[in-house]
Structure formats: C-alpha cells, structure tokens
Image: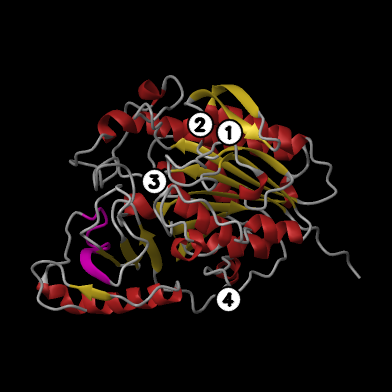
Amino acid sequence: MAEPAPRPNIIVFFSDQQRWDTLGCYGQPLPVTPNLDRLAAEGVRFVHAFTCQPVCGPARACLQTGRYATEVGVFRNGIALPPGEKTLAHFLSGAGYEVGYIGKWHLGSNRPGDPDRIQAVPPERRGGYTDYWLASDTLEFTSHGYDGHMFDAQMRQVDFKGYRVDCLTDFALEYLRTRDGRRPFFLFLSYIEPHFQNDHQHFEGPIGSKERFAGFVPPGDLVGAGGDWREEYPDYLGCCASLDENLGRLRGELDRLGLSGNTLLIYTSDHGCHFKTRNSEYKRSCHEASIRIPLLACGPGLRGGVEVDELVSLIDLPPTLLTAAGVAPPASMRGRALQPLLEGAATDWPREVFVQISEDHTGRAIRTKKWKYSVWVPSDEPYSGSATASSDVYVEQCLYDLEADPHERRNLVADPAYASTRAHLAERLKARMAEAGEAVPKILPAAGTTSAP
C-alpha cells in the first residue's frame, strides 16, 4: 500500500486594506505585482472574491473562526476575540500542526480607553497560536512604514529597523529556517500594508514610491471622484509592490529549503479601500472598492493556473484551510471549502456573497454576479460607538446593476422600475441573515419609493 501524502504546510500571506485591482492578474496596468501574477499563473485565482466584513477586527474574527462577526461578537474594531472561540489555530494544532503567527493581530483588546487596551497580547488572547508568536495587537500603533516593534511569546519587545514589510518578512524567513520538520506548520503572516498609517494619515510606501508610480492609471470608481486618491495612490501602490517583492522572497526561501512542493500558500486581504470617496474614510461600505479583495492559492490541491469565476467569500477560507490539512470543518463554520469548485463538484454553490457592515453604519449587503443590494440603519452616528451589531429594522440603501454600472455610479434604490428586483434581493438578503444566525428584519423602502420588501 502506498504511503499517504504528507500533510501540507500552510502559509496565509495576509495584507490589510488591499484592493483586488492592485494586482496585474486582476487588471492593474502597471508592473506592481509580478510575483503575485506568477503565483496566480501557477495556482488558482478566484476572480470574484469578497470580504464578509469590510473592517479590520471583524474580518479577522471571521477568518480565524469561520463564523460571522455578529456570531463571534466582534462586530466592530475594539472588541477582543472571546476566549472560548475555537480558531484555525485550535483545530490545526489539535490535528498535529505547529501553529505560528507574525504581525498584526487586532483581536486582543477592547475599546481604546479601556484598562485592558494592550499591544503585547497575553497567551490567553492569542486565539490558540501557542507554538510561535511575534505580533502587536495593532501593529500600526507600534510601528510606522519604517521602524517599529512587536512582542514575542514572552511579551518581550522585539524592535525592527527598516521598511516594515521587509522586516516582517525577515522574521518569517527566520521562522521557516528554524523549523525541524517533525510537524507540518501553519503560519499566519499578517502585514499592515497597504493600510494607511493612522498617526500620519498617509499611506507609507517605500521611499521612491511617489516617483515610481506617478504615472498610475486611476481605477474607474475613483475617476472624477473626491477623496485623497490623487495624492495617496502612488504610495498605496508602493506598499502593494513591496508586498509582492516580499512574497517573492518568501517563495524563494521555500524553494531553497525544499518546502515549495508541499506548502500551500494563500494570498488575500481583509478588505479594500475607496480612498474617502464613499464615506469619510477608506472602507466600511458596501461598494466594490471596500469589499472586493484578491484571493490566490498555490500548493497541493490548488495548482494548475486555474481561474474560478464563482463568487467566494473570506468566510470560505477557514473550511478551505482545514480541508487542505485533512481536518473536517466543523458545522459551526459558515463558509464552504473552495476545493470542490476546482473539482467541479460544487453544483449548489451560493449565488451571492453576504456582507455585514459596521462602524460607519450598521448595514447588510449581498452581491450577486449582476446586482449589489444593501440596507442600513441611517440613525447610526459613524464611529461614535452607537452603531449596534444588528437591527430589527433596516432601510434600503443601495442597488447597483454591476453589469451596466461596474463602478457603482448610479444608485437605483429609489427607482420604481426596479421594485421587483429589490423585493427579490431583499428576500435573498433576509435568508442569508437568517443563515448567519441573525433575526429576520423588516426592510423599509428608501426615500422616494412606495413599497417595502
């Protein structure tokens, strides 16, 4: 009898606030991502991938647990992951994997101003990452584009000097070089780029980014819009190019160590960036710029230069990772493993992705191949802490025909000609909310319409 194939090592290379269209394989015209484009050519590119929550902490809670943000209780930033939640690290550690985490965590402490606001995350707040730890709870508050520090497993400060993406990758390469090979490893590598640097209110690309990408082609949703993209987009692309260069470094080290053949590498982000064109900051909206993300995979079971056109969600990654490791995903996980999409065995794949929205407002949305439909609680005060996890009553907010209007310029939500479309999408949205454990709400019409779904 043939020996069973060894379980793969798994690396999640996770960026922060990265639009899907910064990658060449998703249409970026400048040579920003040659290494990622090669990864896509060798592996799998998910053409239509979306976050399930367009803000940092909630998206990370979903990705670590496989459950929606409202189920976990982390529906906005500044809420720690509850200690009883089982995460990817718990499941994979239980299956014999060595589990490690490097970078931004953002799930370790509660609201700013509370006594337990932390940066050095104690062991009980690390979501089960017990074998290797080098992180800050909010890396943007312990570092800048150049220089900073994180904390190791003993909560000791570890300084770094140089461009932040390079330094985090240096730590990851050292991690790879020091594995003994007795157990497969799961490494979650969480960068902050291309997220803006909070205290500087600026995207901090490597020195020279403004000149290198001065000739950028603005994405269609930004053309003619306000916001700060005119001055900030070159540095944003510089951040993305640095991520790409360091992905190349990581793959090169995997080759050198003889690990490439049995390592699954996933590249994705927590949400996108609309450059203050949809609300007063960068995300937290239903629009493509906020919710659409890159998603590439290359490794055992996910190779061949394949493009998957079905709509997939960040909530699908946890069961995908467990499946790759030979671990049966628990029933508590809301997503579905992506492997059957490659095997042609996913005949009943969902026709839409579901998104929960918080902080700017309490909202819900679905995205189909053709339509974007969202509802919200207009009484919320943005970023004040008054926004709730959910509501019994929502008001229609947006309806976009993505085939006719891919840049979401024309909101059809108050157009009576689309009443039946809105009613149909409202029922689908309610069904997805119920599947996520939410109460089925009442949805009121937007101003100018005459009937509620």
In the image, residue 133 lies in the stretch drawn in magenta:
no
Compared with 39, 86 (above or below) is below
Taking the view exactly as shown, the residue that stands out farthest to the front is 115
Q: Classify 10 Å Cα crowding around label 4: few (below 14), some (14-19), many (20 and above).
A: few
Residue at 16%, 58% (x, y): give it: 410
Q: Is mark 2 on a helix, strand or loop?
A: helix
Name the disc covering residue 21, or none: 3
Measure how far apart labels 2 and 1 are at the Cα level: 6 Å
Circle nearer the N terminus (1, 4) = 1
Q: Which of 48 and 176 is in front in this view?
A: 176
Instruction: Write down the residue under mark 4.
Output: 345
Residue at 50%, 40% (x, y): give it: 117
Q: How many marks?
A: 4
**Residues tagged 3 and 4 counted as in contact (Cβ below 8 A):** no
Coloring applied to the structure = secondary structure
Q: Which of 388 and 68 is in front in this view?
A: 388
Quarter of the image for residue 245 reads top right
Circle nearer the N terminus (4, 2) = 2
Q: Is mark 3 on a helix, strand or loop?
A: helix
Name the disc covering residue 242, or none: 2
**Residues tagged 2 and 1 counted as in contact (Cβ below 8 A):** yes
* Placement of the C terminus among the 4 image quadrants: bottom left
Measure how far apart labels 3 and 4 are at the Cα level: 29 Å
Kindly identify the amino acid type of the residue bearing the numbered disc 4: Ala
